[in-house]
Amino acid sequence: MTVAQPSDVARFTLSSLLDPEVADCDSCLGRLTVRLREVSGVSSAELESGGAVALAYDPAVTTPLQLEGVVRAEGQALATTFTHEVWPIEGMDCADCARNIERGVVRMTGVANAAVNFAGARLAVEYAAAETSRDAIARTVSSMGYRLAEEGAAATAPPEGLLRRVLADRQDRLVLLGTVLVVAGLALSLVGAPEQASIAVWAVAAAVAGWPVARKGVATVRA
C-alpha cells in the first residue's frame, strides 16, 4: 500500500522574481516549470493565471523560502541562456514573406522561437546567445532577400530626397536601373537601331529588375 506524502502549496508571483524577458516568455515559463518539477521535495509545478506558479512540496524536505530561491536561480539561468530580441525588418511585401522569414530563422541552430509581425514589420527572436547571434540571424534574413534594420534607425536618419532614398536601397536601385534600360531600349527602337539591339536591352532590363523577385522566390522554395 502506497502512503501519500504530506504536501503544502507555495505560490510565487513570477514578475517579482524573474527577469521581465523571462516572465513574459511563454517558452521560458514552460522550461521553468519543467525544471521546478525536478527539484527535490516538489511534487508538482503549475502556472496559474495572473502570472504565478504554484508548487506542491513536501514540508519535510524543503520550505517556501528555499523554493523562492530556486525559482530566482532557475529564472536567472534562463535569462543568461536565452536572449530575446525584436528588430525592425525591411523588404517584406506580403504575409507569405513573414512566414518564410519565420521558417528560415527558426531552423537556425540556437534559435528557439521566431515570430514576424507583418503589420508592424518586426522580427521577434528567442535564441541561445552561446550558439548564435544577431549577425548570424541578419545573414540568414539577408540570404532570403530581406534586411534587419537597427531599432530607431528610421527615426534618427536625416531627411533625404526621393532619389537619395531610392539609391540607398539595393532593390530600388535594381528597379531604377531596369527602368532606365527599358527607356534606353525604346530610344534605340525610335532612332532606327537594329531590332536585336532593343530586344537585348529589354532582356537585360527584365533580368535586372526581376532579380529581387526571383531571389525571394528561390528563398521561398528553399524555406
Image (tube, helix red, strand yellow):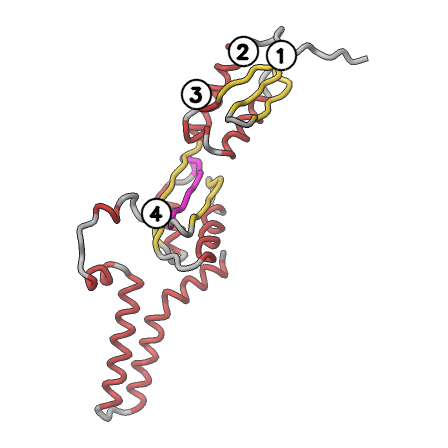
Residue 88: numbered disc: 4
Specify whether residue 130 is painted magenta: yes
Classed neighbour count for the residue bearing mark 4: other residues with Cα under 10 Å, few (<14), some (14–19), many (≥20): some
Indicate which disc, 3 or 4, sits on the residue closer to the N terminus.
3
| Three-letter amino acid code at the position of disc 3 | Ser
Vertical side of 43 occupied by 22: above or below: below
Identify the residue at image location x=33%, y=70%.
Answer: 209
Identify the residue at image location x=46%, y=19%.
Answer: 72
Q: Is residue 176 left or right of residue 51?
A: left
| Three-letter amino acid code at the position of disc 2 | Pro
Classed neighbour count for the residue bearing mark 2: other residues with Cα under 10 Å, few (<14), some (14–19), many (≥20): some
Instruction: Give the residues in magenta.
Output: 121-131
Instruction: Report how far apart the C-alphas of labels 1 and 4 lie in the structure.
Output: 47 Å
- Asked if the residue at tag 1 contacts the one at tag 2, i.e. Cβ–Cβ closer than 8 Å, the answer is yes
| Three-letter amino acid code at the position of disc 4 | Pro
Q: Is residue 85 left or right of residue 201?
A: right
Can you give x and y, in whole percent of width and height, for residue 53 in the image?
Answer: 54, 22
Residue corresponding to mark 1: 8
Instruction: Report how far apart the C-alphas of labels 2 and 4 lie in the structure.
Output: 42 Å
Vertical side of 40 occupied by 102: above or below: below
Can you give x and y, in whole percent of width and height, for residue 212 in the image?
Answer: 37, 65
Residue 16: numbered disc: 3
